[in-house]
Amino acid sequence: MEIVTNLGNEIARYLDLGTRQIQLTAANMANNAGTDLVGDNGGAGDIFNAPTQVAGSATALQVVLTDPDKIAAASLGLGTGDGGNATAAASLATQGIVNGLTPSNFYSNLVSTLGASVSETTTQNTALAASVSQLQGQVNSLSGVSLDDEASNLEEFQRSYQAASQVFTILNSVFASALNLGVETAVA
Amino acid sequence: MRVDPFYVVNLSSSLDQTQSNQEQLTAELSSGLRVNTIGEDPVAAAQNVQLLNSIQRDDSFTQTTSLTQGLLQVTDSALGSVVTQLNQAVSLATQANNGTLNSSDLKAISNELAGVRDEVLSLANTNYQGQYVFGGSQTGTTPFTLNNTTTPATVTYNGDSDINTLQSPTGQSIQLNLPGDQVFTSATANVLGVLNSLVADYANGNAGSGVADTAALNQALNYVSQQRVTIDNSITRLNNASGAASNEATQLTAVQTNLVQADIPSISTQLSLSQSQQDALINVIAALGQGSLFDKLQA
């Protein structure tokens, strides 16, 4: 249980709302700081919709730009043929915009941390499963019913019963012999 | 302590384990990948993310360069044609300046020069996929318009002086365009202005300031050739950068393959071992499941 909670916290820490908003905001700001094909000089509109709350944020995360002409590739004030803002947006890839890391380094860190947690959890799971199986064995050895055990007990009881009945047979013949004063008769 | 009477249950859980081990090995064999989930090797998975990222960046740069090469080649061939036209204009002007032609010949030369001027103007308005190549950032507007009502005629530049660059994955900036005002209406060598002046010089049937303007035209011709070098350099640099990017992508792909590819012989051995274990377990279970001492008692 502890492991599951830790894992959950790990993921939540890495995918926290603030972090995602930083990335999306950077991309949106880049698009709003240029000139697009339809002539918006600044304020071309957001590319992404940044979620406002953690719950359901994965679903809320979406591309809101519907018209490719609204991509502001040109720098402010320049004609549509310029590519200055596109270059600036591309350079976001090498800037530390997510917790001081570049997006690709950040994602790579997330994958490695998450992978390590998964691996650790799997190892612990295996160890615990082995422990459970061992304990189960011990419990079974104490409380389980072994057919072989029972069969050998049964045999033992049967032999005891036969031995006891043999004693009665002998006693019977001794008494008969005493009552008939040593004469063997058919009467028992 | 007694022996666990339910050992068959434990044996079957061992059987489950060998089964899942086999499934994992089979998955590695069929995909050829050693790392199928991030938990199997977190460090390799993280490195793989970085490698994929770089490979994708290289690939998208290579795609961009093939589009951009078209643009640069169109620009280069337009400038080449301008040089050819200007050479023709120089020979026409030289002919006009040698003093042997009569006024109607000079007028004819003026007309021919006007034809050259119109040709140069249309080359200056070259477009590539609907985008004017000499308009700076104003690629949607015709860069040059001619006004014939004045003498000499005037040419207006409607573009700007913006220079576009393409950045390679290694951070190299490659110039993609020459603004029209730099090539055709520059203060140092006003190509279209000189042509207009020459047309006006001979239009009246005399040489006018033809000699001085021809000298200016020669200068303009050299200037355009120099400008063309910039574009030629860009084409060379773009080709080199594109080659470097695709080489890098190839190398990174090789690194990625080494990082995550499965060692087939080793997996095959493990798989065979796991199968033997499974067979042994099944045999043990079959032998042990045959009953108890009760069976013997009845006999």
Image (tube, rainbow, N blue to C red):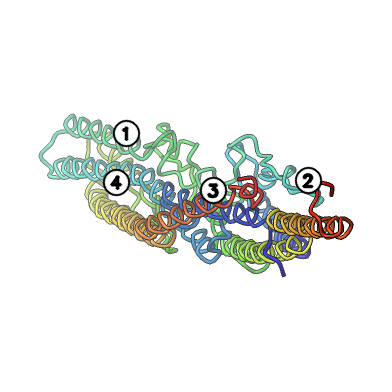
From the viewer's perspective, is the residue at label 2 or at label 1 nearer? 2
Q: Quadrant of residue B205?
A: top left
> Mark 4 falls within which chain?
B
Residue A44 position (above or below residue A95):
above
Q: Secondary structure at mark 4?
A: helix
Q: What's the CA distance linking mark 2 and mark 1?
A: 63 Å
Q: Which residue is mark 3?
A: B286
Q: Chain of mark 1?
A: B
The residue that disc 1 covers is B118
**Gap in Å between the C-alphas at discs 1 and 3?**
97 Å
| Quadrant location, the N terminus of chain B | bottom right
Nearer-N-terminus badge (4/3): 4
How far is the residue under mark 4 from the one under mark 1?
19 Å
- Which three-letter amino acid code belongs to the residue tagged 3? Ala
Q: Which mark is residue B76?
A: 4
Q: Which residue lies under the disc numbered 2?
A: A56
Label 4 is placed on what type of residue? Asp
| Residue A51: % across, % down | 77, 48
| Element type at mark 2 | loop
* Quadrant including the C terminus of chain B: top right
Q: Residues within 10 Å of mark 4 (few under 14, many from 20)?
A: many
Give the number of the disc on residue A184: none
* Towards the viewer: B232 or A99: A99
Check chain identity for marks 2 and 1: say if they share one: no
State which quadrant residue B188 falls in: bottom left
